[in-house]
Image (cartoon, rainbow, N blue to C red):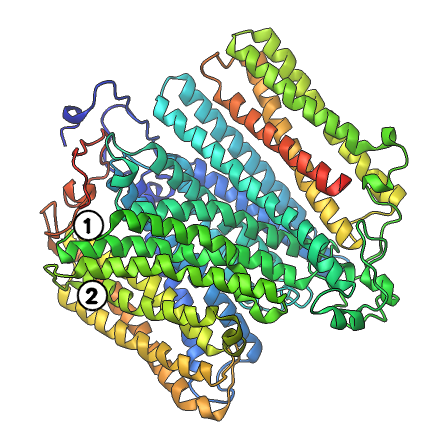
Amino acid sequence: MAATEHAPAGYEKYHVPDSSSLAVRATVGLILTVFGAGLLLNDMTFGETHESGNAKWVLAAGLVFFIFTLASWFRTTIRENMQGMNSAQLNHSYVLGMFWFIFSEVMFFFAFFGTLFYVRQLAGPWLAGEGDGGRMNGLLWPGFEFSWPPTITPQEAVGGTDIQPIANNGAFLTQERSMSFADAHHWYQWLPMWNTIILLSSSFTVHVAHTALLKDQRSKFNLWLGITVALGIIFVGLQAAEYYEAYVLFGLTLNSGIYGSTFFMLTGFHGFHVFMGMTMLLIQLLRSVRGHHFTASDHFGFEASSWYWHFVDVVWVFLFLFVYIL
Amino acid sequence: MGDHHHGPAKGLSRWLFTTNHKDIGTMYLWFSFAMFILGGTFAMIIRAELFQPGMQLVEPGFFNQMTTLHGLVMVFGAIMPSFVGLANWLIPMMIGAPDMALPRMNNWSFWILPPGFLMLASTLFMEGGAPAFGWTFYAPLSTTYAAPSVTFFIFAIHVLGISSIMGSINIIATIMNMRAPGMTYMKMPLFVWTWFITAFLLVAVMPVLAGAVTMMLMDIHFGTSFFSAAGGGDPVLFQHIFWFFGHPEVYIIILPAFGVVSQVIPAFSRKPLFGYASMVYATAAIAILSFVVWAHHMYTVGMPVAGELFFMYATMLIAVPTGVKVFNWVSTMWRGSLSFETPMLFSIGFLVLFTIGGFTGLMLSIAPADFQYHDTYFVVAHFHYVMVAGAVFSMTSAVYFWLPKWTGRMYNETMGKVHFWISFVGFNVTFFPQHFVGLAGMPRRVPDYALQFADFNMMSSIGAFVYGASQIMFLYNVIATIVSGEKVSDEQVWDGAEGLEWTLPTPAPYHTFEVPPKIEATPAHG
């Protein structure tokens, strides 16, 4: 085809990158990571006491390789953009990519929130004898009363692992105190409230930073982005403190039945996402401070990170409502 | 780089490092065919064991590993990647785009698949054997009672999920952002539309599957009790989460197949597709409904009656948009100038057999009747009518239809037609009798059966061997075409085919539409 003949006026060519080893390198990193993790977990759960210690090295090598590959991948895309290879259309592909990636994350959390609602509204009351299967559950788990946060597991209700008639796969001991507002003694000692204040403020500070960037105010942008990152670090620190409190003081662990399961998985995955978002924003801060990247009209790396940050913030609002308060 | 793109790189690095949608599409197609052969081998072992009643060839535990891996490999390794390969090849050519929107990520979504499946297949050689809990991996079979290899199964699912999500995001970005000027949404070929909607389904439900396997991982290794009643969880919860993914998943498999048939039937009827707009709306309706019908897989698990009724009626509603589609395909052929080349034969085979699978699905949707059919061979027959005669037939149709455009060579028509008829007969001999044994009460996933099912089972096994063998003929035909097929230089290839891909030279050059084509102002659909 004689290409230029058809080109509409003002058409910028869509840059299709040359062949690249990034994908294969990232594959090696990812596969080593999951394979090492699988070996490590199986050693932990099914292994002999003196298992050979190779698994953790496979995992570590995979993670290092993966992280370095991702870093070099992002560096490549940043350089391409700074060399002016990206048309407006190509930039829009990145926008769409980030948007639908965040949507997929929303659906991941949806699975865990759905689990929480299902257990609280349906499975819990059924186990305590309500509904069509109530009589059967009454026979299997006599004496189990359901409440949220739970005060007893069905296993404890019947008298422990040895006595329960079915589903004998571990000991589940209810926590002494839960993280719920109902169990909090003093509101000002209640960490989730402080975490809520911190995370909501950080959504505001990242917005202020964005506004400053749009007006080309570099130092104001750096300042407010720095504050956002600091708030993110404080959040993760408080979350760690909360876990310490749970494990050491409240007897709330992953083995505390369905309350512990949902609590740690929801807050844990959220905390991990906060850590990811904080890392992303920190990288944008370093780019701005050290490399003077970003202009008022071209700052997608920052913008995408801030979308991600708002997303973890919204997830927290739901967590705060459904895990801690209601 | 620069203005002049050259041809592909030489040697292995072309395939490892490529960013070209045609190369990546080709790799997806070959990989999925390899998985089709692997999953087919597992099926042959299953049918050989079931050839006669009594235990003949394999241990019951190994039989369970075969049914499990057959399902997993066929769904995640053969059917899904084959349609992603088709999407890679065709979507940019159909919408006038130079490539996929995010080419390097495209390569990554392919390359994590082979090691992911290697990890899954390697579980066969692990202590305790491969996963043996069925492709639906219900807890507690997959948690409390699973072999240690389940950990690698879980990570394999994560890897395949990552691949699917990245592939889908790429397809969404391509369709939303890369259409040539004038290629409005309602001018897109139906194959593009069906993939667009499929990609949304994938991005919505693959993360939910990731959540399900993550909960399994935690239950197995970290003492959580998501699926254990003793801790206040519920094994039925697993089924809800799984089928919240699993039901949209079956539409993920069949919607691109609908798209293929909607390209092939008009081409060989020499008429525009009947009811283009209603096809688009019906596809969207099926996708939306697919989110509210999942529990029809679980009627017998002990749900409240209100739940059973809701899921029953919602499921039956899906028959309406599906009926619209079947009606439109038939109406497209009505008074058309029909010819019956191999792609058309496979598409008509699809139309007839998929409709049968749809009707048995309607039977299964009736909750009280399902109490009789549940977990019998009737269900096996039903979903093989939609998976094999639906998805695989349409995929085969697609390969014959576009192979000349891809390779510049024509396949052997006679051999293609023989392949179709052997497939068609072999398929029906395999699966039609399974309706009867199922209705009479033969349970699925069991290596032995009562004597009264012997004749029909032997028939099924013979049919399966015939169908399996006919795929070797398909492979031979494709390779012979690539190596020494008769050259085609006509851009159009098929005189009735419509769409931008048929305006490109044959074979399609390495880079196409580097500058967007001009789209005619008149609507492409009648």
The residue under label 1 is which amino acid type?
Thr
Q: Report if residue B218 is visible in the image.
A: yes
Q: CA distance from mark 2 to mark 1?
A: 21 Å
Using the image, tell me which numbered label, if any, was put on residue B188: none
Q: Is residue B192 left or right of residue B104?
A: left
* Disc 1, SS: helix
Q: Which residue is mark 1?
A: B407
Q: Is B499 situated above or below B480? A: above
The residue lying toward the viewer, choosing from B282 and B242, is B282
Measuring from the top left, give residue B231's x and y in whole percent: 77, 59
Q: Which residue is mark 2?
A: B345
* Disc 2, SS: helix
Q: Is residue A221 left or right of residue B380?
A: right
The residue lying toward the viewer, choosing from B252 and B322, is B322
- The quarter of the picture where the N terminus of chain A appears is top left
Asked if the residue under mark 1 is in contact with the one under mark 2, i.e. CB atoms within 8 Å, the reply is: no
Measuring from the top left, give residue B51's x and y in whole percent: 42, 85
